[in-house]
Image (cartoon, helix red, strand yellow):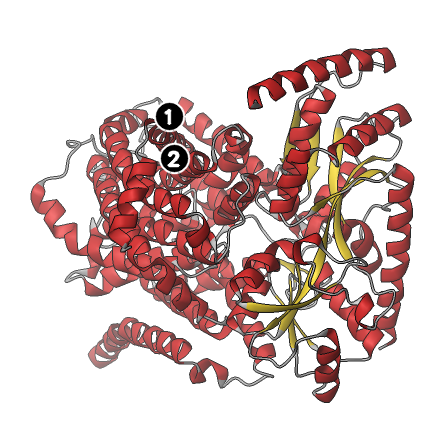
Amino acid sequence: MKIASGILTAVLSVAACSAAFAQGDWPKKTISLVVPYAPGGYTDSVGRITARYLEKALGAKVIVENRAGAGGIVGTQYVAKSAPDGYTLCVCSVGAVSVAPVAQKVQYHPLRDLSPISIVSTIPQTVIVKKSLPIHSVDDLIKHAKAHPGALKYGSSGAGGLMHYTVALFQVRTGTKMTHVPFKGGAPATAAVVSGEVDLSFTNMTDALPQMEAGTVRGIAVTSSERSPFASKLPTIAESGLPNYSAESWNGIMAPAGTPDAIVQRIATALAAMAKDEDVKKAMAVAGATAVSTTPDEYKKKIAQELEQWSELVKEFQKK
Amino acid sequence: MDAFTLLGQGFLVAGTPQNLLFCVIGALCGTLIGVLPGLGPVATISLLLPATYALDPIGAIIMLAGIYYGAQYGGSTTAILMNIPGESTSVVTAIDGYRMAQQGRAGEALAIAAIGSFIAGCVGSLVVALAGPPLARMAQKFESADYFSLMVLGLVSAVVLANGSVFRAIAMILLGLMLGLVGADINSGMPRMTFDLFQLSDGISFIALAMGLFGVTEVVSNLESKSERALQVRPVRGLWLSLPVLLNAKFAILRGTLTGIVFGILPGGGATVASFSAYALEKRLSDDPSRFGKGAIEGVAGPEAANNAAAQTSFVPLLTMGIPTSATMALMIGALTLHGIAPGPMVISRQPDLFWGLIASMFIGNVMLVIINLPMIGLWIKLLQVPYRALFLIILVISAIGVYSVNNAIFDVYLTAGFGVLGYVLRKLDCEPAPLLMGFVLGPALEENFRRSLIVADGSFAVFVQRPISLVLLLLAAALLTSVALPFIRRRRVEVFQE
């Protein structure tokens, strides 16, 4: 069965290839899909799943190139400065695209130097608390934090990352104060909630799910605007009394600005089909992510909205 | 079902012809990659990952694990033959191993490294099988304050491991600590000492530093002497170990194994601290510590056993908790995820075949590595007979490729060249690079855990002595420091007395 479907995809991709020749001769060489994080991480998994699919769909070799550094800035900048010929693409993520440009100095503008193609996966942050705490809901959390200002400690993947900023946003909206404890990466921050060294963290679903299943931490909410299919019992923060609170981690494919529209559209079409592919959905689910797709315009709008949300937060920070 | 029954089932899984083949391929690839300077398991596994998509998850993970411990084996080969450690754990092996090679005892050094690793690997795997989950719970008891004290112990070991002057060793550790400070500040995220170079925002690459200080420096120093060939001073005196030599090293192997098992389960530098501590331990216990740094076989046997035992037990937090202990382990998590398995506390009960199959394959892999490596010793030694005008060029080119492959960054290659110059200057000043690397590796972890402990303890320094684990580690460090300082002070007093 697998072989049969393999042959079928091969035939289809050959067909797709010949159709492509009619549109121009892209792709005629290897496409490199830059992952701005170290191999083995969550974005790396998403990148590899995408590369595996695009290789079949575009009929060209697609390799994953890890260019890690500075929370994704190094790799994203590399792509922003690459030739806009459709052979260098980025598996960008919310941190380096929507958060870093407003929070620190970067040498690219996410919308002027990059051309969004499609979001491929989303993953909510999950609010997990250590089991010994009497906190069972977002409401409990707010009350506890207000009763003991600064006493609750939250772990993050590092200063200025999404795990830090989602809590910062939560504090601003609820008027609470908690203490930030940065770790080097999301996994050790999650482990610290398990061991009880910190009280809570807004951890991504990939890291949180196995721990919640094993009962080592207590999940109380998700940060996305809709509930997550992986933990449908968990309410969103928005439905727990903080309307409009929405923060989720996404990964999307971007090209250097100026990449020919025909190429952008062709990749977008392939990615739209990818989001419906059963194998891809399954693979993304294991990573804790939901396979999605957007049009380039929808993607652009989302980034613009996020840039606005985080720059307001940063302004709030600077007032203090 | 008891662990032995389960392990037996594991052997059935790992022993299928197909999985045996993956195990051999992995171990062989790993060895070859490990031997090439600069190329490490991280680059190899990420390159070979797509090739495993077609395999079933168990076969894939067995192969990738084979690459990992194969590379540990291979890494010690270049450390011994060419004084180029590819990983922080083989820095120590280079100290006495390279000296042995210069004395024509390369075969002996390689053989003891292989045998020590084999014994440690088997014992380590057995420990993972019998006590994996309880060990993982123990590792979880470690909090930031305990890690801080562990790093202090590591740094004290680095002083002990210095062979020349204690003053120079401390200076080198401090220099290493300072190099380790480069990069984003952990609490604020602000760049520190990066000179506005975003390439430095995550700090200096370890591989670039190690390749520069060891590899490039070695080549440059060798070029200095026109006719002589320092790489191998005397001809090779036989490839094998004599029985008395092996018996001499047996306790070193056992102590190293134990050290490695304990430290290997700790995330964040556990394996590095293990190999350095094993060396320090051997030197302290030795009747004649002055032999160390001049080709002492225990100085190779102990740390090699420690790093291989640590390589096995570092799978414990990964498989039982889903927590990676190193970059390679993070990659393993990625590989498992791509194969549809979410690592975490439930893996053992949900995927018993995977867990026990992997452990069984560790035994098989260790046996294969000895079978692959012992006969290859002759081949590796022949490598030294390659004319040096070719060999040096090859070393430099492969090192450059290796350094580049880690982050795909040309900047790291420039860094390597720069550290080559620094290494040469340090060598002229009689300063050893090993304590510098130790400071560099442990420094950031020391700072990170120190600052985090204080945040969590609301600024109270008492946390370091209130936590039992931390207190024990600090006392150990103090004891070790006293044992180094005492003879030093006594000698000074004798000198004063003589005047």
Q: Secondary structure at mark 2?
A: helix
Q: Secondary structure at mark 1?
A: helix
Residue situated furthest bottom in the rendering: A147
Q: Amino acid at mark 2?
A: Asn
Q: Is residue A214 visible?
A: yes
- At x 12%, y 51%, the residue is B248
| In the displayed structure image, the side of residue B488 where residue A302 appears, left or right | right
The location of residue B140, given as percent across then percent down, is 45, 67
Residue picked out by circle 1: B388
Q: Is residue A68 visible?
A: no
| Image quadrant containing the C terminus of chain A | bottom right
Residue picked out by circle 2: B222
| Image quadrant containing the N terminus of chain A | top right
Give the vertical position of B166 relative to B220 (above or below): below
| In the displayed structure image, the side of residue B497 where residue B223 appears, left or right | right
- Do tag 1 and tag 2 residues touch (Cβ < 8 Å)? yes
| In the displayed structure image, the side of residue B108 where residue B488 appears, left or right | right
Chain on which label 2 sits: B
- Looking at the rendered structure, whether the residues under marks 1 and 2 are on a common chain is answered as yes
* Quarter holding residue A137: bottom right
The location of residue B153, given as percent across then percent down, is 38, 69
- At x 49%, y 75%, the residue is B145
The location of residue A45, given as percent across then percent down, is 62, 42
Q: Amino acid at mark 1?
A: Tyr
* Residue density around tag 1, few if under 14, some if 14–19, many if 20 or more, within 10 Å: some
Residue situated furthest left in the rendering: B244
Of the pair A68 and A266, the residue shown nearer to us = A266
Of circles 1 and 2, the one toward us is: 1
* Quarter holding residue A227: bottom right
The location of residue A41, given as percent across then percent down, is 60, 47
Of the pair B324 and B244, the residue shown nearer to us = B324
